[in-house]
Amino acid sequence: MTQLRQRAPRQRDQKHIDYVNKLPCCVCGSTRNVEAAHLKMRLPEIGKESPGLQQKADDRWVTPLCHYHHQSGIQAQHKVGEKRFWFEIHGRNPFEIASRLWVESGGEERAAVPKPVKARKVRPRKPRGKRRPVPPSRPMQSRNSFARPQA
């Protein structure tokens, strides 16, 4: 039987995304309209799992791509698929690029620092006098089907 596991929440790092957006495209070198392209491929050797359908990968796994190579071009990453785009067409390893940028941007140090837990706001209870009264319930009746009718 297959065991179900809970999906880990997506790790976000806006400073890393901002850093990657300032870099040139890693395919053509263009500095215009550069976007952080998330990698959804899995590579178990380095601990990278696929995030799942309709899920975005962690911000750690991004590479800088211009809009043409990311989404709008004829052979864009989103049009031809990640494996074909990176390995067959361009002959590059995106995981090496993403790992190097993660270390350069300081993401490794930021990820090691635990994030503070935010306390949930809980509404205080109303005083007894201001609470709405609970309406009385109807009396319970037995639905015993074995009961004999009285003659």
Image (cartoon, rainbow, N blue to C red):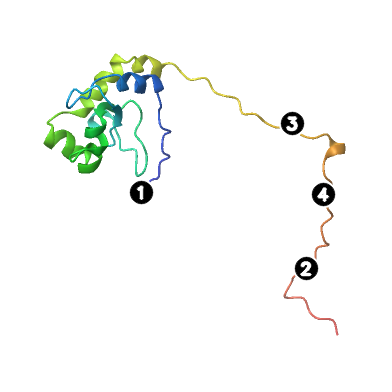
Name which residue type carries label 4. Val
Whether residue 106 sits left or right of residue 145 in the image: it is left
Q: Mark 1 highlights which residue?
A: 2
Residue 75: which disc?
none
Cα separation, mark 1 vs mark 2, equals 44 Å
* Residue found farthest to the bottom: 151
Q: Name the spot of residue 90 as percent of width and height, x first.
A: 13, 32
Write down the quadrant of residue 45 in the picture. top left
**Mark closer to the chain start, 2 or 4:** 4
Name which residue type carries label 2. Ser
CB within 8 Å, label 3 to label 1: no
The secondary element bearing badge 3 is classed as: loop
**Mark closer to the chain start, 1 or 4:** 1
Q: Residues within 10 Å of mark 1 (few under 14, many from 20)?
A: few
Residue drawn 26% across the image and 19% down it: 23
**Mark closer to the chain start, 1 or 2:** 1
Q: Name the spot of residue 84 as percent of width and height, x first.
A: 16, 39
Q: Mark 3 highlights which residue?
A: 124
Cα separation, mark 3 vs mark 1, equals 43 Å
Cα separation, mark 2 vs mark 3, equals 40 Å
Write down the quadrant of residue 81 in the picture. top left
Vertically, is 141 above or below 89? Answer: below
